[in-house]
Image: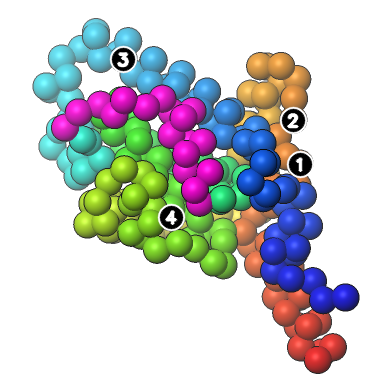
Amino acid sequence: MTISPRKLRYDVYSYSYHQNSKTPLVISVLSSLIERSLARNERIGRKCDIKHNGCSKTRVRVFDCDETPDMTIQSYLERIFRYTRAGPSVYVVAYVYIDRFCSAFPEFRITGRNVHRLLITTIMVASKYVEDMNYRNSYFARVGGITTEEMNTLELEFLFLMNFKIHVNVSVFESYCCHLEREVSIGGGYHIERTLRCAEDIKSRQREYNQMSRITL
């Protein structure tokens, strides 16, 4: 029996992509982490003069919007999942990118004005890294509530700011999964989907399947 790419993805992720699927647990955990970071940064912001923050003189301001979007982080991530159907591993890789970005630019702080654009950008880049088939930038832009021009600009700025260091190896991926799982354990003892795998592993399995398919033809 021929295994379709959709069935293969199901086997790799052990996750259902039907319309009635529940939201992956990783989204709720990531939302919780981001919300805590926002709250911490708000406390820091009240204690110092934001106008003198070095961040105002750097390119990371590209993620700032004029007004704070009226949508919670949880709702925004659920919207992205609902319309893009990006697998759980995409959100783990996006989390790796966000952590790397914040480490590379200590002056950058996640705030209500930049978090939504940062999320849609990192998730789109992560999706392109993890998945073999993706939506166009224009579609991600509509899902994220921004223009296609803004989406293109955010993607390019992010990649250049990161010096195109978007590779995530297996050990790094697993370490972030473990970190997210610890967060889940603290919050209620659940477990993030254990079948999350690095894009490197996923693509290697897909290549093996493609080779086997050619042999059987």
**Residue 166 higher or lower than 214, as above or below:** above
The span from disc 2 to disc 3 (Cα, nearest Å) is: 30 Å
- Residue 92 image offset from top left, x and y in percent: 57, 43
Q: For mark 1, give the secondary structure.
A: loop
Count neighbours of disc 3 (C-alpha within 10 A) and say few if under 14, some if 14 to 19, many if 20 or more.
some
As measured in the structure, the alpha-carbon distance from the residue carrying label 4 to the one carrying label 1 is 23 Å
Mark 2 closeness class: few <14, some 14–19, many ≥20 residues within 10 Å: some
Residues rendered magenta in the picture: 66-84
When asked about the image quadrant of residue 60, the answer is top left
**173 horizontally vs 110: left or right:** right
Name the quarter where the N terminus is drawn.
bottom right
Q: Secondary structure at mark 2?
A: loop
Q: Counting other residues with Cα less than 10 Å from the Cα at mark 1, is it few (<14), some (14-19), or many (20 or more)?
A: few
Amino acid of disc 3: Glu
Residue lying at 16% horizontally and 32% vertically, measured from the top left = 66
Cβ–Cβ below 8 Å for labels 3 and 4? no
Distance in Å between CA atoms under marks 4 and 2: 25 Å
- Which of pointers 2 and 3 lies earlier in the amino acid sequence? 3
Front residue of 101/92: it is 92
Which mark is drawn over residue 42? Answer: 3
Q: Disc 2 marks which residue?
A: 191
Q: Position of residue 97 (x, y in %)?
A: 45, 45
Label the magenta part by its dominant secondary structure: helix
> Residue 12 shows which numbered tag?
none
- The first of marks 3 and 1 along the sequence is 3
The front one of 2 and 14 is 2
Disc number for residue 194? 1
Image x and y of residue 135, in percent: 45, 62
Q: Are marks 3 and 1 in contact (CB under 8 Å)?
A: no
- Name which residue type carries label 2: His
Vertical side of 211 occupied by 17: above or below = above
Q: Are marks 4 and 1 in contact (CB under 8 Å)?
A: no
